[in-house]
Amino acid sequence: MNSPTDETFSSISPAEFFYRNRQMAGFGNPTQAVYSTIRELVENSIDACEQKQIMPKIRVSIHTIDSDELSISVDDNGVGVPTEEIPAAFGRVLYGSKYDARQRRGTFGLGVTMAILYGQITTDTPVLIHSQTENSPGILLSLSIDVENNEPIVLSQESLMRKSTGTCVKLHIRGDLKRSIDRVVEYLSLTTVGTPHACIVLDVDMQESLTWGPYSDECPSPTITCKPHPRSADFEILRRLMDKNPDFTLHQFLVENFQQVGTRTATKFLSFMAFDPSERVSKLSRRAVTKLSRSLQKYDAFSRPDSRCLSVIGKRPMQSAIKSLYDPLLVAYDSRDPSEWNGHPFILEGAIALGSSFPVTSLPTLYRFANRVPLLYDASEDLLTKVLRKTRWTRYGLKSPKSVAIFINLCSTRVPYKAAGKQSIASIPQIEEEIKHLMNSLGRKLNKSLKKTDKIYRDKRRIRMFTKYFEKITSFSADLADYPSVPSVSSMIDELFEVDTDV
Amino acid sequence: MSESSKENSLEKLRALGARLIESICDGKFPSIQIPDRSTANIHFDSELNHFTLGDGFVIRDSSNIKHIRSFAQLVWVASFAKNLLQSGRTSSLRDLYYSAEAFDIDFKNQAESDRIVTDLECAIGLAREEFAIYSEEHSSIFGEVTMEYTAPGYEGRQLDLTVSPDGLPIGPAIMTAEPLHTDANRILAVESGGIFSRLIESHAWRRFGSILVHLGGQPPRSTRKLLRKLTESLDIPLYIFTDGDPWGMHIAQVIISGSANAAHIPHLTVPSAEWIGITPQDIVDYKLPSETLKGVDLKRLDELSNDVRYTSTFWQDHIREFKEVRKKAEQQAFSRYGIDFVVDTYLPDKLSLC
């Protein structure tokens, strides 16, 4: 069959593909582009601090160049990027150090390069990268991307020392600052809820700068890189791992490459699924690999995936961040035990807070986080929103609208985003179930606290009322009896209510 | 109010205050015992023919948060009363209700402050008139009797109660005045103001030798107290003339046997008083213009027939007759036969029988 379109088939580079579909990655319009650029750079900066347990200090600067052109720079105190890696790390799409099973903010090696690509195309300006690591001295690079070939082009390069290790990325983009600034501020402040030990400073056009954090001095311990769980092994993963170890027997291959698979489990699995354990993996046919992948995904006798590769915000840091940012009357935290979806471990944690900083609504105001990163767009399509609406908040003291907010963080080695823009979480039954339990337990905590604060308030009022009347009894009695003075009764009242509270 | 009764009242109030303040000085939360006024503790003494309180009492405890507010209100009323007595002033119940605000004592409504006043009456065993608190409504009195005032500024002054053809309001001053002597040989208490005026204008009071009292519906306690005082100290009988319906009959009954509400106050009743009409038989005999008894009237008759105060055949007969004639008539109904018919014919008929 010969259709006229046949001739236009040709491969395009990933860079070109993503530029053509930039709305998928969050660069659809000048407003969203400002937010996405800052977000990608800040996420990278925090990740660059995490592995070395550096307390992140990040400075975001935005300068208006022209009515619709902005200069954005993000400077961090992270580990820096080795000189030889800089061109590829920033100038090639789908290149990165993040293709392993541990919790990361970014995943695809796509975000920062998208921002650079977007800036290059809309303003025809190269990106400036200034980085320094412990081993490579400071270097300032000017870089652009060859879109067609997905290749970085280094335009200039000079030695320039930094005060410490870290990276500063500065680029020009077409953007609408007026319409995006609120989102940027919201994003950065929420980022310090997800990463309470970070300090973030925002400068806009040389005006007074805003500072958030740090709200916690606990630096989370670095996450452990884990082997993939067998249930997460799709065809592509198996093929890649087999190419690396062609001489392994099937049994050896499973034991060496996957977590929760020891010799006994491997033997049991292979005999149960009728595979020959001594067959070399290089000898396996395509069909056999497909069958292996399906069998691994179906087999439910593997233990749960290791959750040590996950890093939750934690009770104290999260509460302290919310307290500092919103000054709530009360805040309660809870987290769920580790769980898994398709072999990917995940943990849900959240906090619920009551205070006048939040809007008064019948449903709690939802703040969503995935791997500590705040999600600001596409809330209506998000699984968290869906569960929030299904939860019966009236049971938890929200019979009338109140200023309550709920913060939920989903940690996973694989967050099921709906699109590459990474703004909403897709519906996964296992995750939905856990969200439901978390929201219910936060609801119960809210209800309990509400009742407690109500009671404290009521008790205080009762004591005040009692004191007023008892003082009156005393003064009127003194008057009646022509007593020269009115005795003090405060110690009597204190004693009375102390006894009351002890009972 | 006489000096001695005033001193007596002040002493009781002071004693109450002393007991409370001494307890507080000892670091103890004081409590007050108040005779229980609930129906379970109210008994009808058929020998004395009035209600009395039993031995039950309630305790107001100032360490109990549920009692503290009414406790404070009670002590305030006591101190308010003490100051009234000391400065020779009086206050109406309504005045007291409003005065509370100045002392940052709150009453939900006057019903609440009235109840607290009653609590104090019970707690110290005095009628509120004895601590200078009166009700707002006034009955009137007219007749040949000389009273001597004890009210401040009027002490020792004597007054003949015929001084005004409108009659004199029975306020705190007359309430506390002492009857000296009278030429009258009976007291006639009438329900409506119209008949009261008629009796004065037509000089019927002189013809009947009567002191006249206008009750104006169910009379205030001060009026009942004055009636008792007059009958006792002048030794003359009391006749009560009301509308011919169950309500009028009950006005007379309360004067005679008292009410459960005032069971804690002694010396309010006039057991020897007589109800002269309008009886149901009068409605028939005088062919009075009348109305048919309504549902509420009949219901009231049923209640009264079971009331301890109505057990005598005298009262049971009247109740039965009301039910038979099923009619009621107002005092003014006699005007059908001319405005003086009531004084020229009806009352002489009735009083000559007595």
Image: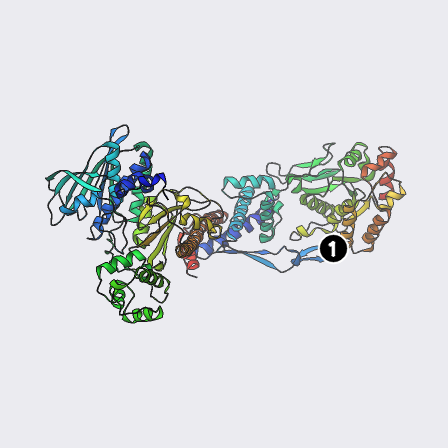
Q: Is residue A23 visible?
A: yes
Q: Residues within 10 Å of mark 1 (few under 14, many from 20)?
A: some
Instruction: Tell me the quarter of the image containing the N terminus of chain A.
Output: top left
Query: Farthest residue toward the top?
Result: A67
A289 vs B295, nearest the viewer: A289
Asked if A66 appears above or below B354 in the picture, the reply is above
Q: Position of residue B48 (x, y in %)?
A: 73, 56
Give the amino acid at mark 1.
Asn
A298 vs B173, nearest the viewer: A298
Asked if A382 appears above or below B29 in the picture, the reply is above
Q: Position of residue B90 (x, y in %)?
A: 59, 40
Q: Is residue B238 visible?
A: no
**In the rendered view, how is the structure colored?**
rainbow
Determine whether, in the image, residue A220 is placed left or right of residue B341.
Answer: left
According to the picture, the residue beneath numbered tag 1 turns out to be B49
The chain identifier of the residue carrying mark 1 reads B
Determine whether, in the image, residue A164 is placed left or right of residue A223.
Answer: left
Determine whether, in the image, residue A155 is placed left or right of residue A223.
Answer: left
In this rendering, the count of numbered labels is: 1
Instruction: Tell me the quarter of the image containing the C terminus of chain A.
Output: bottom left
Q: Quadrant of residue A375?
A: top left
Considering the numbered disc 1 on the image, is that residue within a helix, a strand or a loop? loop
B109 vs A329, nearest the viewer: A329
Q: Position of residue A287 (x, y in %)?
A: 33, 60
Q: Position of residue B168 (x, y in %)?
A: 70, 35
